[in-house]
Image (spheres, helix red, strand yellow):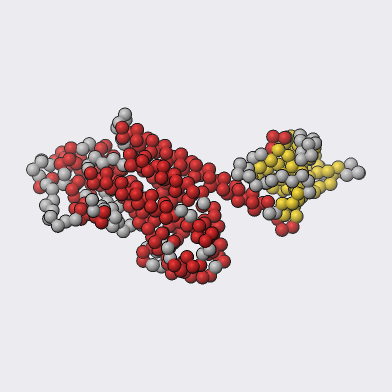
């Protein structure tokens, strides 16, 4: 097969713009289905509008399909539109094929954007010269691997389409490529935190980077779109791909082999997205812990703050109430960091720093509401018990908050 005549390879629309026309396309599809239903009732088989268009031998496969750059419908392809096979299909089957075609067309547009991201931005000699090896890794992550996987996926989708454009399947192809999706998307999406930080740091602190970036983004190949819009595409695509499979799945006849394949492909994408989200949150939590560790000093027993399983749940400043020798309350600010497994009590210092004077496992912390009047007014007061603090002792604190 001649790969230079791939039916979707010359689409002009970038993926960022493709999603904007998806809704309009769905509306057009419904209108066309309604019109076709009328044609079936009013037209005889010999009607001129049901005859196939006469094609010259020199027409390329791409030209015969007429897959345009404006998100064509499956029924817009002359070979499909002029076929009696189409007329024998129910509207439900037609909608199913349109949903499958949408997956292929969107992947073609997505790949076009990835090509711009890799060939125009990532491989720019000017941009490469400005970045360190680590910055290149964080900024572009495994973008080229994502592009290569998309290219292979689209190639297989097109092969299926070319075999039989009336009954082509895409779910088996998606299922077969699911392991490759996981291999490249999971690390790419997980790197999101580093990617965003690197991009903003370069944009704000490197004037030369900003100049080169503006020149690259002004190139017509970008269609007035920013580098950032290209970098976030993989995050958007895996979610969109799951929705496309869901749309196909709900139109497939129950009990068919195709339904089994669609379900398995959908489940694989759903799990991938879930794992990506969990990894991103875990990465952000770890980054937050690393940042916090740099601002914390321990005057009590030290424990390693940074852990992949630890996350910050809530933090804030409270007012500690202490009895003095005159049996009156004195106050002092205490800052609490509540993690999913640990509670830290600190004295706040200038510059956003903290001195930890006590801590305990989350399972050893207990809170108890305390009804009492202070200075004639009801306040939000509670007791905090550490059943076993950093020294293995039971301790108690009395805190007041400004709000309930």
Please, is residue 281 above or below residue 211 in the view?
Answer: above
Please, is residue 220 above or below residue 147 in the view?
Answer: below
Q: Residue at x 69, y 46 (%)?
A: 304
Q: Residue at x 68, y 54 (%)?
A: 294
Q: Is residue 232 visible?
A: no
Q: Is residue 298 visible?
A: yes
Q: Residue furthest top?
A: 255
* Percent x, y of residue 338: 68, 43
* Percent x, y of residue 107: 34, 50
* Percent x, y of residue 299: 78, 49
| Quarter residue 94 falls in | top left
| Quarter residue 399 falls in | top right
Q: Position of 17 compared to 55: left or right?
A: right
Q: Residue at x 50, y 60 (%)?
A: 136
Which of 323 and 53 lies nearest the eye of the viewer?
53
| Quarter residue 329 falls in | top right
Q: Residue at x 75, y 55 (%)?
A: 349
Which of 194 and 109 lies nearest the eye of the viewer?
194
């Amino acid at each position: 097969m001649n790969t230079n005549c791939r039916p979707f390879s010359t689409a002009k629309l970038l993926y960022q713009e493709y999603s904007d026309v998806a809704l309009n396309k769905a509306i057009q599809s419904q209108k066309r289905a309604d019109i076709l239903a009328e044609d079936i009732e009013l037209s005889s088989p010999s009607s001129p509008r049901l005859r196939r268009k006469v094609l010259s031998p020199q027409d390329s496969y791409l030209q015969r399909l007429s897959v345009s750059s404006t998100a064509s419908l499956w029924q817009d392809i002359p070979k499909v539109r002029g076929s009696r096979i189409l007329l024998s299909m129910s509207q439900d089957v037609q909608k199913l094929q349109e949903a499958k075609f949408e997956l292929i067309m969107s992947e073609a547009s997505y790949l076009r954007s990835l090509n711009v991201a890799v060939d125009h931005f990532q491989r720019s000699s000017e941009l490469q010269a400005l970045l360190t090896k680590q910055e290149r890794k964080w900024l572009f992550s495994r973008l080229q691997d994502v592009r290569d996987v998309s290219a292979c996926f689209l190639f297989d989708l097109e092969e299926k389409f070319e075999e039989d454009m009336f009954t082509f399947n895409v779910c088996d192809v998606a299922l077969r490529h699911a392991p490759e999706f996981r291999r490249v998307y999971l690390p790419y999406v997980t790197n999101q935190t580093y990617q965003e930080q690197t991009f903003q740091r370069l944009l704000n602190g490197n004037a030369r980077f900003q100049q080169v970036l503006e020149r690259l983004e002004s190139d017509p190949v970008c269609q007035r779109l920013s580098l950032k819009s290209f970098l976030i595409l993989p995050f958007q695509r895996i979610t969109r791909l799951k929705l496309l499979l869901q749309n196909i799945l709900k139109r497939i006849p129950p009990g068919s082999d195709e339904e089994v394949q669609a379900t398995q492909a959908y489940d694989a994408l759903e799990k991938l997205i879930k794992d990506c989200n969990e990894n991103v949150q875990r990465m952000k939590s770890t980054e937050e812990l690393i940042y916090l560790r740099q601002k914390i000093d321990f005057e009590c027993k030290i424990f390693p703050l940074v852990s992949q399983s630890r996350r910050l749940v809530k933090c804030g400043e409270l007012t500690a109430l202490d009895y003095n020798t005159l049996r009156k309350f004195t106050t002092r600010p205490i800052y609490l960091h509540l993690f999913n497994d640990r509670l830290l009590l600190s004295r706040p210092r200038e510059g956003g720093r903290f001195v930890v004077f006590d801590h305990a496992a989350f399972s050893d912390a207990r809170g108890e509401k305390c009804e009492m009047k202070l200075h004639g007014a009801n306040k939000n007061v509670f007791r905090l018990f550490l059943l076993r603090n950093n020294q293995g002792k039971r301790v108690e604190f009395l805190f007041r908050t400004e709000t309930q």
